[in-house]
Amino acid sequence: MSEKIKILHIFNSFFVGGMESNLLNFFNNADFSRFDHYIFVTQDEGPLKELFHKLPIKIITLKCTPKRYFYCLPVGYYFCKKNRINIIHGHNYWLYRYAYFLSILTKIPLFTSNYGLGKWKKKWDLFLESRIFSRARINIAISNVVLEKEISLVKKIDNPGRKFKLVYPIIKDISEKNLLMYNKEVIKQKLGITNDKPVLTIIGRIDRLKGHRLALDAVGKINQDAIKVNLLIVGPMSDPTVFKENDFDKEYIRYLNYYEQLEEIWAISDFFLISSISEGTPLVLVEYFAIGKPVIASDISGNKELIKDNWNGFLFKAGDVDSLVERIKSVIENKNIHEIQNNARKYYLDNLLPEKLVQDIEGYYSDEYLAAAP
């Protein structure tokens, strides 16, 4: 393949989220000798902005909101023609709508990536989404349940395996050995954790769907008589109503809006919690496997795909505070925890290494480029 394949990615911004982190990790492992990548964003801002701008990628800001993308179609058309774009890749619903119409206008092959279930969508949204999936050459989903939902929207399809692909979230490759360099007691002191009880950590934006309230209530029940576990919450504030006024008066609860040295958090955490009520496959779940730390997760579909209960992690009934209470207690007392940690790390090495997942996506690009060649 003598000529580079040119990919135009379309997404929203550089804020910290599963989609943005997944894309950043993809680019950090991408083969720039074979591919040129371009990015359209509607907001050139966010904590990850500097990291994206350091990449050998051209970034263009669309001067419109996602819901007014028709105004940006002429800009996209002339950009694609001038730069001889080979594939348009839209990431998540509002932005692959724009990618869909741009693909029709330019006659350039369309890819989509879907990072969640989008239960808020109305009939018109679902109809348009079905048209998008039908037109796209490849639709990439981060969990089987998202994949199956996409396929269900396309009523007439002979070979869904050709058009719909599963690629789990891509993380930075992490060495669990790096965490041994950190002095846990110093970090705990810095964060104001003054007792010697286990640290249970939940990482992600503060949102009702992420289940933070459930975690707070469960840990409160466990610590009724005395402190048995600390709860460390790390993530940007999306919905302040999740917290109650006196939550942070408790000695065993710590909240950090943003923490630059995430490896320090991983190092001091004894267990991790994913309490989400609904989402695809959480990127943090793959991170926890990579560092070989035990994870307690709600039994939603994306978690159940990767976690075999009591083998490489632990599951509890989503939204059920008593189920979570019992699960946290049993994990703290589990004598086989090191074996479960080893299983989680092995599962990551066997199935979820970043270079493997990136190669899968680049293989789809190459196959489609060759198929479209005259």
Image (cartoon, rainbow, N blue to C red):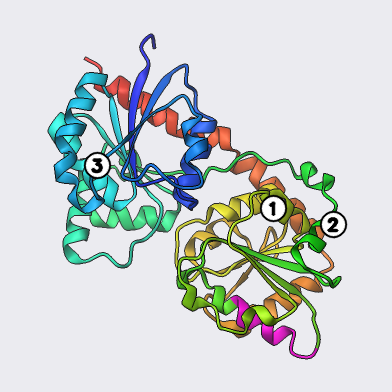
- Give how far apart the Cα atoms at labels 2 and 3 are: 46 Å
Residue located beneath label 3 in the image: 63
Whichever of callouts 1 and 3 sits on the residue coming sooner in the sequence is: 3
Say what amino acid the circle numbered 1 marks.
Ala
Residue located beneath label 1 in the image: 344
Whichever of callouts 2 and 3 sits on the residue coming sooner in the sequence is: 3
Query: Mark 1 or mark 2, which is nearer to you?
Result: 2
Pick the residue in front: 308 or 373.
373
Left or right, 313 with reference to 140: right
Say what amino acid the circle numbered 2 marks.
Val
Tell me which corner region of the image, top left, top right, bottom left or bottom right, holds residue 10.
Answer: top left
Relative vertical location of residue 38 with respect to residue 222 in this rendering, above or below:
above
Residue located beneath label 2 in the image: 186
Q: Is mark 2 on a helix, strand or loop?
A: helix
Numbered range of the magenta stretch: 215-225
Few, some or many C-alpha atoms within 10 Å of disc 2 (few <14, some 14-19, many ≥20)? few
- Count all numbered tags in the image, as a single digit: 3
Where's residue 54, x and y in %? Answer: 51, 29
Q: Is the magenta stretch mostly helix, strand or loop?
A: helix
Whichever of callouts 1 and 2 sits on the residue coming sooner in the sequence is: 2
Q: Which disc is residue 58 wearing? A: none
Where's residue 123, x and y in %? Answer: 18, 65
Q: Which residue is drawn at 24% across and 42% down?
A: 63
Kindly give the residue lying farthest to the bottom in the view shown: 225
Relative vertical location of residue 35 with respect to residue 154 in this rendering, above or below:
above
Does the CB distance between marks 1 and 3 fall below 8 Å? no
Q: Is mark 3 on a helix, strand or loop?
A: loop
Tell me which corner region of the image, top left, top right, bottom left or bottom right, holds residue 165.
Answer: top left
Relative vertical location of residue 60 with respect to residue 295 in this rendering, above or below:
above
Q: Residue at x 47, y 78 (%)?
A: 241
Q: In which quarter of the image is the C terminus?
A: top left
